[in-house]
């Protein structure tokens, strides 16, 4: 157990950040899955910038690796282009 006031605060703040990161990551994964299921090119093209922005935000906050975000963006862009 933590002995210092700052360590207790760090434990609390880490838990809040963990929950927030988990929520944002799961929301992005759901958005990616919805984009992959789309068959209408116009609808998919409209959703793609939002998903790319979500991935960039996760990479910026180090929730996912930068290269993983780039790979996902590339694959999603190719998917939308092939519709």
Image (tube, rainbow, N blue to C red):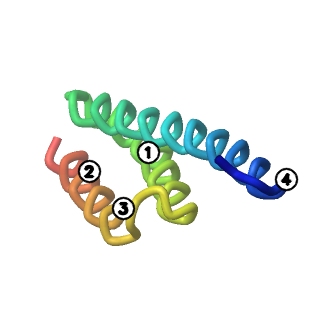
| Mark 4: secondary structure | helix
- Mark 3–mark 1 CB contact (< 8 Å): no
Q: Residues within 10 Å of mark 3 (few under 14, many from 20)?
A: some
Residue at 25% over, 28% down: 38
Mark closer to the observer (4, 1): 4
**Of callouts 3 and 1, which one flags the residue occurring earlier in the amino acid sequence?**
1
**Of callouts 2 and 4, which one flags the residue occurring earlier in the amino acid sequence?**
4
| Mark 3: secondary structure | helix
Quarter in which the C terminus is drawn: top left
- Mark 1–mark 2 CB contact (< 8 Å): yes
Please tell me whether residue 71 is drawn above or below residue 76 in the rendered image: below
Q: Residues within 10 Å of mark 2 (few under 14, many from 20)?
A: some
- Mark 4–mark 3 CB contact (< 8 Å): no
Q: CA distance from mark 3 to mark 2?
A: 11 Å
Mark closer to the observer (3, 2): 3
- Mark 3–mark 2 CB contact (< 8 Å): no
List x then y, in percent, for residue 34.
31, 28
Mark closer to the observer (2, 4): 4
Question: Which residue has dot 3 on it?
Answer: 69
List x then y, in percent, for residue 12.
72, 42
Judged from this view, the residue extending furthest toward the left is: 82
Question: Which residue has dot 2 on it?
Answer: 76
Q: CA distance from mark 4 to mark 3?
A: 37 Å
Question: Which residue has dot 4 on it?
Answer: 5
Please tell me whether residue 7 is drawn above or below residue 26 in the rendered image: below
Residue at 28% over, 55% down: 77
| Mark 1: secondary structure | helix
Question: Which residue has dot 1 on it?
Answer: 51
List x then y, in percent, for residue 4.
81, 56
Q: CA distance from mark 3 to mark 1?
A: 10 Å
Q: CA distance from mark 1 to mark 2?
A: 9 Å
Q: CA distance from mark 4 to mark 1?
A: 40 Å
């Amino acid at each position: 157990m933590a002995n210092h006031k700052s360590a207790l605060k760090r434990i609390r703040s880490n838990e809040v950040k963990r929950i927030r990161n988990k929520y944002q990551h799961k929301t992005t994964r759901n958005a990616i899955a919805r984009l992959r299921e789309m068959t209408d090119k116009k609808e998919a093209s409209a959703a793609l910038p939002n998903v790319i922005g979500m991935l960039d935000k996760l990479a910026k906050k180090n929730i996912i690796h930068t290269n993983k975000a780039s790979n996902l963006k590339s694959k999603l862009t190719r998917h939308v282009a092939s519709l």
